[in-house]
Amino acid sequence: VGVLHHLPDPAKGLRALAEQLKPGGLMHIFVYSALGRREIMLMQEALALLQEGRTDFTEGVRLGREVFRVLPDSSRIKSREKERWEMENERDSTFADMYLHPQEVDYTVPSLMQWVDGVKDLGIEFAGFSNPKMWDLKRLLGDSPELLEQALKLPKRQQYRLAELLDPDTFTHYEFFLSKGPVTKRDWRASSDEELFAASAIRQAGLQPWPAERTFDQDFNLIQLSDAEYEFLQKCAQDPTAELVEWEDDEKPRKISEIAAEMEKTITRDEILRLLDLEFLFLRP
């Protein structure tokens, strides 16, 4: 779910979704970070002033690009655009979505947790970030046992807050899970080949770039797919939960054995398990 931060009342939107979650179910949420997008927020306000309250997106994009052109290279707004967002913002539609969106709510860890706690009465709990390695304080403080020990004494939510304070540029958004009651995750490594290849395969809808033989993982590392992995993922049904698509006949999840039988390359057990570890692939028994 990646549109909640564009609602006039995100709390109401989250509650509407939470009311539909079944026991044992998960929600995957994506919302913006105020610290990681602080330069974006400054530019949004600057363009709003220059447009004098008008909502002309074509003119807003023109003005925005002109601002970036004339700002000195020492400007933090300009340098952040060039180092992080420039390639993504080559398209005017993406530029407008980032800098001219009329409705946006940005969060910090404290405000995010306060928002999530608003549905605790429905039995909904925060189940963790989907990129846990980035939130591990060992990544930031591991070279100092003293600091790391002190940091790990903090409650988990304060550890998350410390991570974003120390490394705000990394956290441009939050991707996390909410659960309703206990959630069990199957260990496919413990399954037999027969069980594994009888499972239905679903491709992660958020792969970027896609289709491509090299794509980013959840920690923004560029992953090189093998020929068989790439062919296999192309033949998998896409998870419709992140995109507004319906499963037509050719998009219904199929068994791995069925997909493998029509492939030119041979997909191995180890390759399937690697795609699962990367979260490029999900399986249903």
Image (spheres, rainbow, N blue to C red):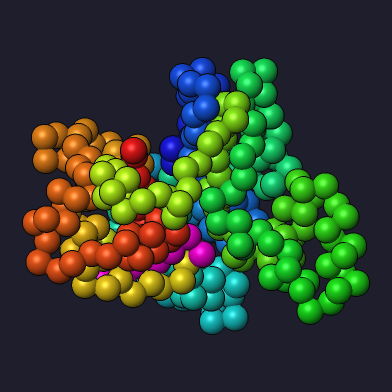
Pick the residue in front: 237 or 140: 237
Q: Looking at the picture, how far across and down is residue 80, in whole percent?
A: 54, 71
Decide whether residue 213 is among the magenta residues. yes
Residue under the point 64% across and 37% down: 126
User: Residue 70's spot in the image, x, y percent?
Assistant: 46, 76
Would you place residue 66 above or below residue 31 in this image? below
| Residue 99 visible at all | yes
- Verify whether residue 194 appears in magenta: no
Asked if residue 208 is positioned above or below residue 238 in the image, the reply reads below
**Which residue is pictured at 67% across the width and 18% down the height?**
121
Q: Is residue 204 visible?
A: no
Please name whichever residue, 273 or 237, is drawn nearer the observer in this view of the structure.
273
Q: Quadrant of the C terminus?
A: top left
Q: Please give the name of the residue rendered at 61% of the width and 18% of the height, measured from the top-left corner.
A: 122
Residue, far bottom: 73
Instruction: Indicate the quadrant containing the N terminus: top left, top right, bottom left or bottom right.
Output: top left
Number of numbered callouts drawn: 0
The residues colored magenta run 212-219
**For this view, does 69 lie left or right of residue 15?**
left
Res 251 → quadrant = top left
Residue placed at 27% from the left, 73% from the top? 226
